[in-house]
Image (cartoon, rainbow, N blue to C red):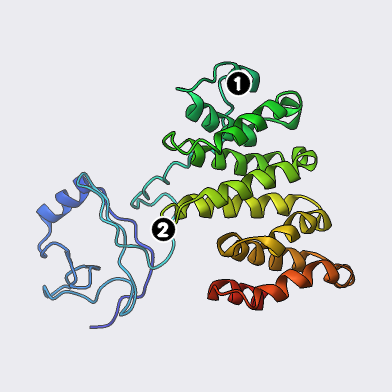
Amino acid sequence: PSKVPAAPLVPMPPASLAKDQQHSQHPPPSFHQNGQLQFPGANGAHAPPLGGAGGRGMAVSGSAPCVELGWTAAPPSGGSSCSSAPAPAVAPTTAPQRTSLSISELLANCGPSTRKSTLRALALAARSEEPEAWEKPFGRVLILVLDSLGQKDAQGVRETALLCLQELVVGQPSFFNDFAEVVASRLFETYRSCTPAETHTAAMVDRTIERLLGVVDATRALEILVPVVSSEAASLLQMAMRILATLLQRMPPQEVLGQLDMVLPGVVAAFSNPDPDVRKAAVFC
């Protein structure tokens, strides 16, 4: 039998289709094995599927749940087709939530039992509050954070203080221009106090120092880091050498050449360090 040319078809309403099938002498239409709709010919044999050999059938709708079979061409004007599923709702983007209390109120309510929660709230405020809100209380916040770095016995307080300090460096970097040396010295001390089992805390200190030295002038950061490279033990020396390599990449070549007399003695001494990790860090530096 000849193929029926592909053409958009308008499916008949279910009630009309049932009525026509009742009075028709031919068998009702059926679905081809590939999912396409086909109608019987005059002799009862089924004609080729609608849409051609490689085409797609039409969409059939009725009282039953809609079955999407697709269209070979766009549905004709006024035709019936399956309605597509509604697009998933997209949640609107929201700005960072502000803390319910002001920074001064958080500090006023801070005590031994609430220190950890206060540090978390301050970490959130570091990104959500504008710099104007930090001008007056920043010094008090910094004292609280640095004091919390020495509380090894309080569960999770030191780690929360490090997290708060990281958020402050990222969210309010301009305030550290006056405190970079003090904060770096406290962080070096915290790193020295970490035991071999406290690898997570040591990694947090490492990351905090790197962020701190990344927001101050490169020459000033070098002046903070060089004394550590020249005199420290293996654990802190390895971390300092790695940060030194990153720091030198930020500086123009001519400026690096001008700082070689200050940097090279510590780096050369690290080549003879008994710790292989320190020697490796010196090579990459």
Residue 189, horizontal then vertical, whole percent? 61, 47
From the image, state whether disc 2 or disc 1 is nearer to you: 1
Query: At numbered mark 1, what does the secondary structure look like: helix, strand or loop?
Result: helix
Task: Identify which residue, 279 or 76, lies in the foreground.
Answer: 279
Name the residue at 24% across, 47% down.
Answer: 62
Residue 164, horizontal then vertical, whole percent? 58, 38
Residue 129 visible in the current orientation: yes
Task: Identify which residue, 160 or 276, lies in the foreground.
Answer: 276
Residue 183, horizontal then vertical, whole percent? 69, 42
Amino acid type, callout 2? Pro
Q: Give the number of the disc on residue 75.
A: 2
Residue 95 visible in the current orientation: no
In this image, 249 relative to 153: left or right? right
Q: Residues within 10 Å of mark 2 (few under 14, many from 20)?
A: some
Read off the residue under disc 1.
Answer: 107
Task: Identify which residue, 93 or 243, lies in the foreground.
Answer: 243
Q: Between disc 2 and disc 1, whose residue precedes?
A: 2
Q: Give the number of the disc on residue 247.
A: none
Q: Residues within 10 Å of mark 1 (few under 14, many from 20)?
A: some
Amino acid type, callout 1? Leu
- Check the image and name the residue furthest to the bottom: 1
In this image, 53 relative to 131: left or right? left
- Specify the quadrant of the image occupied by residue 125: top right
Q: Is residue 224 above or below residue 129?
A: below
